[in-house]
Amino acid sequence: MPDRIPSSIPTTADDRSRPRQPLVFGGIPEAEGWALAPITPRDRVHFRTDQELPLEAFRSELPDGVTVSYDQGDGLYRVDGSCGSAAMLADWVRAWCAGAGVTTIGLRAETDVRRRAPRDLPPEFLADLCRHYGPVSLKRLQRNMSTIRLHLPDPDDLGQQVFEWVLKAVAQYDETKSVPFGAFLATQLSKWVHDLGRNAHGRTAADTEHKQQKAVAAFMAEHQRRPTEKELAAYMGQSVATLRKNSQTVATLNGLRNLQSLDGTPDATEVLLPDSSEAPDEIMGEAEQTLLSHALTAACAPDPEARRDQRAGQPNVLGWATWYLTTWGGQTKTQLSSDLNTSVRNMNVYADRVGKSLKHRLAELAD
């Protein structure tokens, strides 16, 4: 076990003035452990696909010395090879995927990527390091827990995600830069928590929300009150019209988040969809999508004549997400099913309801 001072023992001024003893994992001092598997440069190809790759078959045909990893959270594949092989790897991936009937999305090659494979570290060192930094990371993330629970409500899922983040930090940590691993991990955790929203709801919407939250927090710290709409717009250097459009983006994002159960269980809380009088044009992207976004939002709104306990009396958030993310978000239903933790069949049921209503509303608009 690591040679550490238990955190339950109070520290004194004398204790704090003493040099901190190095952490020991699996009987190996931390600095020595990193030296056993130093971070090295490599070439990398990043890409996504329109359907999941058969990884076992893909790995079996990789060129010698080439490895692949898959981030299920954002659907990103990473193929790593020796320096100077980026162009060759990109061509190989394109050819293999084409032969398998798979379309690559956003494929790009990157050179001189510095990474290490966690499995190259001594097993006892890595296991003990994870046992130490897992609870440390959970404590560090307490300030972000309200955000994390929107995406990882199950404690077991959260625990697994934290250990995945620790391993991700191990792969990226450069011990030659004289930054302690704990400090590097803390910095990365803040970024990866923010990425949860970006991966789930789109980069533009999540970044917009993040900027607004930071501006509101900064204004409140300075003035000890929440800003008015005009004050917030001025504080962010935006027009009130732009702020309102961005606020609609955030409202739509929060409406999706408020859905506690995509399968409509009795414990589901009330869901807020954007007001049907306002279309989420900022999310849709182009001005010509205004009529479509009005119609889509209205098609997903509750039927005012239906009882609250009927399906039609509930806002159809899953149908909205399915239509938006597959039509404008560039995702397949298979990818979306994994992201939203629901079945494609269930998505189709809710999307069909939207389709029937949307067809009727678009016909009215055409008239």
Image (cartoon, rainbow, N blue to C red):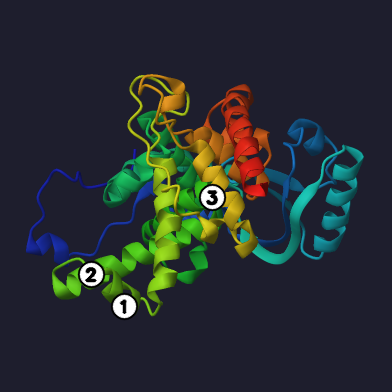
Q: Quadrant of residue 184?
A: bottom left
At a point 32% along the width and 44% down the height, the residue shown is 138
Q: Quadrant of residue 151?
A: top left
Instruction: Tell us which disc is closer to us: 2 or 3.
Output: 3
- Near-viewer residue (331 or 155): 331
For badge 3, the amino acid type reads His
**Label 2 to label 3, Cα distance in Å?**
29 Å
The spot of residue 275 in percent (x, y) is 41, 48
Q: According to the image, label 2 marks what residue?
A: 227
Secondary structure found at label 3:
helix
**Drawn side of residue 155 relative to residue 168, left or right:** left
Q: According to the image, label 1 marks what residue?
A: 235
Q: Earlier in the sequence, mark 1 or mark 2?
A: 2
**Label 1 to label 2, Cα distance in Å?**
9 Å
- In the rendered view, tell whether residue 88 sits above or below residue 2: below
Q: Quadrant of residue 179?
A: bottom left
| Label drawn at residue 20 | none
Q: Are marks 2 and 3 in contact (CB under 8 Å)?
A: no
Residue 159 seen from this side: yes
Instruction: Tell us which disc is closer to us: 3 or 1.
Output: 3
Q: According to the image, label 3 marks what residue?
A: 294
**Drawn side of residue 174 relative to residue 5, left or right:** right
For badge 1, the amino acid type reads Tyr
For badge 2, the amino acid type reads Pro
- In the rendered view, tell whether residue 125 sits above or below residue 191: above
